[in-house]
């Protein structure tokens, strides 16, 4: 009895399908719709405890009233038919004998005894009340979404506006971090502006400012000083300074004896190691002991290495201008003087080759006056020494002059600080990777120091002096090879030691992005201009790939060959790099229809095979002026040749014969020159050209001939032209093509 009582208190639960069906059968007033026979079947779905739908064909006798439940044969399983015109069976009546159609256990739940009838409307209302107490998942989800939107609105109202520093170049991710915004929101803002970007994409300052304003923040431009404050230099206190070795750069014209003087100082033979006997690399060396040390920088004298000489002048304290006594001033000598003046560096003139017969050093001194260089012998303030590198004459005097000049300059530096210097040269070596020659200018460079150089950064793995020995540290004015670069730095870049790897990486990435944008702008403009000229037929292009042993040589070659370009022909440097020629270089040359220049390097075996397969030309050089001459000849081949005319004969028409089905034939006399069958002709009438074309036939009597000489008669017929008269003059000529050279 207690169990039945508890069951009474539990309301019937309708499924959503049941509720919908009831609503369909109930009218606006809530009553059931009447059909023609006043009968309407209402399908009600009941639920058990497990929320499963079951059908019942009969109702228990606990339900009171005249209505009865019965199963409709058309209903689906789990549904029960309810008819208002049918009454419930008496509770004393036996259940149906048909056990097949009746379920083993009825799922119909009893209701309160107060129910005299099963009211569908009341059941629906009770069910809706139950759903209000126990909402569905969809309803809960909608409620949570509403709460989320409300919280977002509140957050927008309380959103913090930030002041965002905008550098020249910034990534989307970095910009989002500075605004404390989601990266996805920044990307959406960019998409609204028509800019498709990802988190790693770089933005310029103008675009970044628009994004900041769009997201409700304020922006201001950050200067390089703000971003690169870790690279700021500072003045050293006077008490921290100690004397340092002078940095001396040897400059002058090619083959005037610069490297020979250095060899005489070092008792070495550097000249023998250079191709063609000329210096094609910039080198740094140190001589002397303890307080008498001198650092020398040797620069090439060839015209192609102008940038090298300029870098040497900027990183030096003193310049030794080498002038051959038998050759006096030459173009590169004058250029070296200009570099020295621009850098405001004192000059010491070394008049070399005085051991040769019949030389006049005074003539050199007089020629220097034209460049406003007045030596001491002519009452000037410029030191000059007559030397012979070959015979080692007066080298001590030259060394004394260097020390004297350095004493006047009072050269000092602080060794007890982080190192700063300059990249003299860089190269790629097998087994060691990227190696750079660094001249330490301030501080002391040590192994394991973290550094930034241009757009590259790294950690010092090893230091090697000019004698090839490993050292632990390098003091100011010391040239040293540094191992630890991931890629080759550019010659002339700064070299600065920083505190942490994160700082080094940040600075290097910023510099790299800025360099790429500038480079792309220049390349884009140059390429667009070149293609425009090519499309207009004004210029032809010669694409080349440059691979050299050192960065300075690659730079010198690029500058030299691009200077050969004219309005008609242009050299396009597709790529330049350091190291051996690789397969990627061959593929690039193949796609660009260019060729590869290897300067003091060779191609790898796979690269040679690829070049042979693809038909890519590779040219090897060890002397730069030979390379420049060959490129000049190739460019000359692209020039349109000069075309001129050469008059070969004059013919007078004396008779005109009209032959049916053939046309007019001119009976002529060759007055001078030779008339050839395949020659081009002009028809002149009263010295006016009325026709230009070719001969269709040239006959001597009745025979076709190849040519007719002066003083002989011939028959001439024009090709596709017959308007000829007696007295007309036929002028024969040929075009002569003359190859042009740069």
Image (spheres, rainbow, N blue to C red):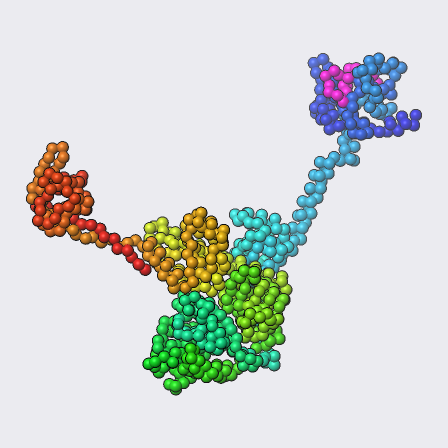
Q: Write the residue at 8% across / 49% down.
A: 711
- Main secondary-structure element of the magenta-colored stretch: loop
| Residue 200 in sight in this render | yes
Residue at image location 48% in from the left, 78% down from the top = 265
Which residue is depicted at the point 71% across and 36% down? 138
Q: Is residue 77 magenta?
A: yes
Is 144 placed left or right of 480 in the picture? Answer: right
Residue 562, located in which quarter of the rendered image? bottom left
Q: Residue furthest right?
A: 1
Count the numbered circles shown. Answer: 0
Q: Quadrant of residue 216?
A: bottom right
> Would residue 407 appear left or right of 672 to someone viewing this image?
right
Please report the bounds of the magenta region as a residue range: 64-88
Q: Quadrant of the N terminus?
A: top right
Left or right side of 319 for 432: right
Q: Position of residue 287 (x, y in %)?
A: 52, 77
Image side of residue 266 versus residue 72, left or right: left
Q: Closest to the observer: 273 or 122?
A: 273
Residue 455 appears anywhere in the view: no
The x, y position of residue 623, in whole percent, is 41, 64
Residue 674 location (% of width, % of height): 14, 49
Taking 687 as reference, is 566 above or below it?
below
In percent of the image, x 46 and y 56: which residue is there? Answer: 575
- In this rendering, the answer to whether 74 lies above or below 523 is above
Residue 81 drawn in magenta: yes
Image quadrant containing the C terminus: bottom left
Q: Nearer the viewer, residue 330 or 177?
A: 330
Q: Position of residue 354 (x, y in %)?
A: 38, 80
């Amino acid at each position: 009895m207690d169990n039945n009582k508890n069951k009474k208190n539990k309301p019937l639960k309708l499924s959503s399908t049941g509720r919908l069906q009831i609503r369909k059968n109930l009218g606006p007033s809530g009553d059931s719709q009447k059909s023609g026979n006043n009968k309407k079947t209402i399908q009600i779905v009941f639920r058990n405890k497990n929320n499963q739908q079951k059908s019942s064909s009969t109702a228990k006798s606990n339900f009171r009233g005249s209505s009865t439940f019965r199963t409709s044969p058309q209903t689906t399983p789990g549904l029960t038919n309810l008819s208002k015109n049918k009454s419930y069976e008496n509770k004393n009546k036996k259940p149906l004998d048909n056990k097949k159609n009746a379920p083993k256990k009825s799922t119909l739940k009893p209701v309160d005894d107060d129910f005299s009838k099963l009211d569908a409307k009341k059941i629906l209302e009770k069910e809706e009340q139950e759903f209000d107490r126990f909402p569905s998942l969809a309803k809960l989800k909608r409620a949570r979404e509403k709460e989320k939107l409300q919280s977002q609105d509140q957050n927008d109202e309380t959103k913090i506006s930030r002041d965002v520093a905008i550098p020249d170049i910034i990534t989307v991710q970095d910009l989002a971090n500075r605004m404390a915004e989601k990266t996805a929101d920044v990307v959406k803002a960019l998409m609204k502006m028509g800019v498709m970007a990802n988190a790693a994409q770089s933005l310029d300052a103008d675009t970044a400012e628009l994004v900041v304003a769009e997201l409700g923040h304020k922006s201001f431009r950050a200067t390089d000083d703000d971003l690169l404050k870790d690279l700021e230099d500072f003045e050293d206190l006077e008490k921290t300074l100690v004397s340092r070795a002078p940095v001396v750069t040897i400059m002058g014209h090619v083959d005037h004896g610069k490297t020979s003087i250095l060899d005489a100082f070092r008792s070495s033979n550097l000249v023998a190691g250079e191709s063609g006997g000329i210096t094609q690399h910039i080198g740094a060396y140190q001589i002397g002991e303890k307080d008498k040390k001198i650092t020398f920088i040797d620069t090439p004298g060839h015209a192609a290495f102008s940038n090298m000489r300029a870098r040497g002048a900027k990183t030096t304290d003193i310049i030794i201008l080498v002038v051959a006594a038998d050759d006096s001033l030459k173009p590169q000598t004058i250029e070296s003087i200009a570099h020295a003046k621009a850098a405001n560096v004192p000059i010491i003139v070394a008049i070399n080759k005085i051991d040769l017969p019949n030389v006049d050093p005074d003539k050199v001194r007089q020629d220097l006056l034209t460049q406003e260089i007045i030596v001491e012998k002519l009452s000037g303030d410029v030191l000059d020494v007559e030397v012979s590198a070959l015979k080692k004459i007066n080298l001590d005097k030259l060394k004394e002059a260097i020390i004297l000049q350095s004493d006047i300059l009072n050269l000092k530096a602080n060794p007890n600080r982080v190192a700063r210097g300059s990249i003299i040269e860089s190269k790629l070596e097998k087994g060691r990777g990227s190696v750079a020659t660094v001249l330490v200018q301030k501080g002391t460079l040590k192994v394991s120091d973290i550094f930034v150089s241009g757009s590259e950064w790294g950690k010092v793995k090893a230091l090697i002096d000019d004698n090839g020995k490993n050292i632990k540290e390098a003091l100011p004015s010391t040239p040293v090879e540094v191992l630890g670069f991931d890629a080759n730095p550019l010659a002339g870049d700064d070299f600065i030691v920083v505190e942490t790897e994160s700082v080094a990486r940040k600075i290097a990435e910023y510099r790299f992005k800025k360099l790429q944008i500038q480079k792309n702008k220049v390349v884009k403009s140059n390429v667009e201009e070149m293609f425009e000229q090519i499309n207009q037929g004004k210029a032809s292009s010669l694409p080349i790939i440059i691979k050299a042993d050192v960065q300075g040589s690659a730079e010198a070659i690029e500058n030299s060959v691009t200077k050969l370009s004219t309005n008609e022909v242009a050299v396009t440097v597709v790529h330049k790099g350091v190291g051996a020629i690789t397969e990627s270089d061959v593929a690039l040359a193949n796609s660009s229809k260019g060729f590869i220049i290897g300067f003091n390097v060779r191609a790898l075996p796979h690269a040679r095979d690829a070049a042979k397969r693809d038909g890519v030309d590779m040219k090897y050089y060890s002397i730069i002026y030979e390379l420049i001459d060959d490129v000049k000849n190739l460019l000359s081949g692209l020039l349109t040749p000069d075309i001129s005319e050469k008059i070969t004969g004059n013919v007078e028409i004396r008779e005109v014969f009209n032959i049916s089905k053939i046309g007019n034939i001119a009976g002529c006399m060759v007055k001078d020159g030779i008339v050839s069958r395949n020659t081009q002709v002009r028809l002149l009438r009263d010295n006016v050209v009325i026709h230009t074309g070719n001969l269709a036939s040239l006959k001597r009597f009745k025979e076709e001939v190849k040519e007719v000489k002066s003083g002989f008669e011939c028959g001439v017929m024009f090709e596709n032209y017959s308007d000829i008269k007696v007295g007309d003059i036929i002028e024969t000529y040929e075009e002569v093509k003359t190859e042009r050279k740069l």
